[in-house]
């Protein structure tokens, strides 16, 4: 696991798909390891505390705004 990451996801690769210049890994999640400091009062990951970020086309972006919930893109 990566010590500096507040959340680590342990996976087992099930399949590797060749996509031209990249590979896509299909995996099964075996375990989720989260620091207690990244959890909210309900025991779930608190994304404000965990401060997640993404890498996209050579840039890093923070994820600091909730834009919906499960299934929101299917709602009319």
Image (spheres, helix red, strand yellow):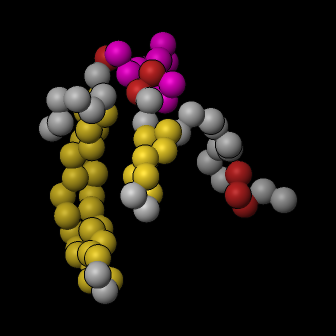
Residue 26 colored in magenta in the image = no
In the rendered image, the vertical position of residue 22 relative to residue 20, given as above or below: above
Q: Nearer the viewer, residue 57 or 72?
A: 57
Residue farthest along the front direction in this orientation: 58
Look at the image and tell me in which quarter the C terminus lies. Answer: bottom right
In the rendered image, the vertical position of residue 28 relative to residue 20, given as above or below: above
**Residue in the image at 27% along x and 62% along y:** 27
In the rendered image, the vertical position of residue 33 relative to residue 13, given as above or below: above
Residue farthest along the right direction in this orientation: 76
Asked whether, in this view, residue 23 is left or right of residue 56, the answer is left
Residue 47 colored in magenta in the image = yes
Q: Position of residue 72 (x, y in %)?
A: 71, 51
The magenta segment: 37-48
Q: Nearer the viewer, residue 20 or 36?
A: 20
Q: Main secondary structure of the magenta part?
A: loop
In the rendered image, the vertical position of residue 23 relative to residue 29, given as above or below: below
Look at the image and tell me in which quarter the N terminus lies. Answer: top left
**Residue in the image at 51% along x and 25% along y:** 48
**Residue in the image at 47% along x and 18% along y:** 40
Q: Quadrant of residue 19?
A: bottom left
Q: Can residue 44 be seen by looking at this rendering?
A: no
């Amino acid at each position: 696991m990566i010590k500096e990451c507040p959340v680590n996801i342990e996976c087992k690769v099930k399949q590797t798909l060749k996509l031209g210049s990249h590979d896509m890994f299909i995996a099964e999640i075996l375990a989720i390891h989260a620091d207690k400091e990244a959890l909210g009062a309900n025991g779930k990951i608190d994304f404000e505390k965990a401060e997640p970020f993404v890498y996209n086309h050579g840039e890093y972006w923070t994820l600091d705004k909730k834009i919906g919930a499960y299934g929101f893109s299917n709602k009319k």
